Amino acid sequence: MGSIRVLSGTENLKYLGAWAGVGAHGGTALVSKTAALPSSFSLPVPCPCQHFGWETGAVSRGRHSSFRMPEGPELHLASCFVNETCKGLVFGGCVEKSSVSRNPEVPFESSAYHISASARGKELRLTLSPLPGAQPPQKPLSLVFRFGMSGSFQLAPADALPPHAHLRFYTAPPAPRLALCFVDIRRFGHWDPGGEWQPGRGPCVLLEYERFRDNVLRNLSNKAFDRPICEALLDQRFFNGIGNYLRAEILYRLKIPPFEKARTVLEALQQSRLSPELTLSQKIKVKLQNPDLLELCHLVPKEVVQLGGKGYGPDRGEEDFAAFRAWLQCYGVPGMSSLRDRHGRTIWFQGDPGPLAPKGGRSRKKKPRETQPGAGDTEEDRPLSGESISRTRRARKHPPKSIAQQSEGTSLQQNRETPTAPTKGKRRGRPETTGGPASPALPTGGRRPRKSKADWKSKADTRSREAGGTSAS
């Protein structure tokens, strides 16, 4: 099983490609002194500040729409967590799968076995190793996990399993039973009992830097590099471990437009060579001070691993996520612009998006949450509330009638503003009659006032006088 050694400050400055990790058959993971191992690790729990979105990398405004998707650094931290928390624990029995998961059953049963983990890019390998004398006799079994949008590992009491624990490994009695759980809220994660890394994925940007760099520069003729650099960075055949927030941070630091052609950006790196007259320490200093894009694909994920804290689990505090939020320079940061690439993923950037930007794509700038639209804001710029959007949709579905189609007298507000004197016979839709005296105008309230006894008496007297006059004539 792999071990963990803490690097000193001097060792952290070693050559970029010398940072090793837990290999497929064990080895040593190098972790900075600033990167304290988490006591619990569950990556995609909603962040307490309700700041980041997962699906597109967008920042949610006033609500929490998604999660921070696991990328290469998070998979590496997860492997460190498994190795640290499972060290010394003896597991036993069958591997239990939830009834709702569509992933395959795990054909493994042993009375006593150990669990270890290693990571490569966006994959994690879990190895179940039976102890000598364990029954039934069983060969070691490896499972390869891809976390999807919300996968994570948690260690919990067997009688208090976390929700959405779709694969469970129980410790052996007589000690209080624990369960190592693969938790996946959205169920996009996957495990493969074959134990092999997914074919076609390139070398890990974090742990296999030299092979990763060589793989990219040897394959620049591939059609993947005809695309914008922001899209090429998500191609796991060449950038295994890079995801949405990492690509934004890498391109921002180098001031590379996200929609510049990938081949144009990377071809220049084929010619870049350091002078052979430089000493090793001078070469290291130059690389650290002026890293190119491929070097940043290694260094930026390494910075995330070295942030420290307890990780991103349910036991973390706001200060743990605050460290990551403070580290971000571009992704979801106020003042940055965003566009969707052709896969629908949001890319954050500053300045010109580049010549391959999607036609008709409208760049949006991130505003601070506390910023309210001022008097100078146009109606287009002001965010619509849910009620306003509903009214807009209703208006589009039921367009206003023309003046000829509108029935007369249906707007009470119009009656209030410009009271008219309806003619006799107009009430209740009766045809209009002519020759009679006009009825008095309705008061502002829209109802006829109730007549008093004096009014009725006056009306009766008027009718009797009119009758008398008629007979006299």
Image (cartoon, rainbow, N blue to C red):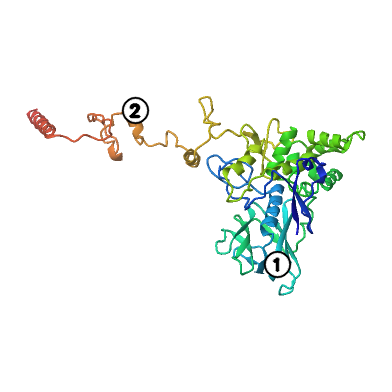
Q: The residue under label 1 is which amino acid type?
A: Tyr
Image point (65%, 48%), residue name? 69
Task: Quadrant for residue 367, please give it.
Answer: top right
Taking the view exactly as shown, the residue that stands out farthest to the top is 376
Dot 2 falls on a residue whose secondary structure is helix
In this view, the mark in front (1 or 2): 1
Horizontally, is 296 left or right of 417 in the view?
Answer: right
Q: Residues within 10 Å of mark 1 (few under 14, many from 20)?
A: many
- In front of the other: 135 or 457: 135
Judge whether 409 appears above or below 22 on screen. above
The answer to whether residue 228 is visible is: no
Taking the view exactly as shown, the residue that stands out farthest to the right is 277
> What's the distance in space between the residues labelled 1 and 2, CA to CA?
84 Å
Image point (63%, 67%), residue name? 96
User: Mark number for residue 113?
Assistant: 1
On the image, the x and y values in percent for residue 344 come to: 66, 44
User: Which residue is under mark 2?
Assistant: 417
Q: The residue under label 2 is which amino acid type?
A: Glu
On the image, the x and y values in percent for residue 135 come to: 71, 74
Q: Which quadrant does the N terminus fall into? A: bottom right
Q: Residues within 10 Å of mark 2 (few under 14, many from 20)?
A: few
On the image, the x and y values in percent for residue 133 come to: 74, 73
Horizontally, is 61 left or right of 324 in the view?
Answer: left
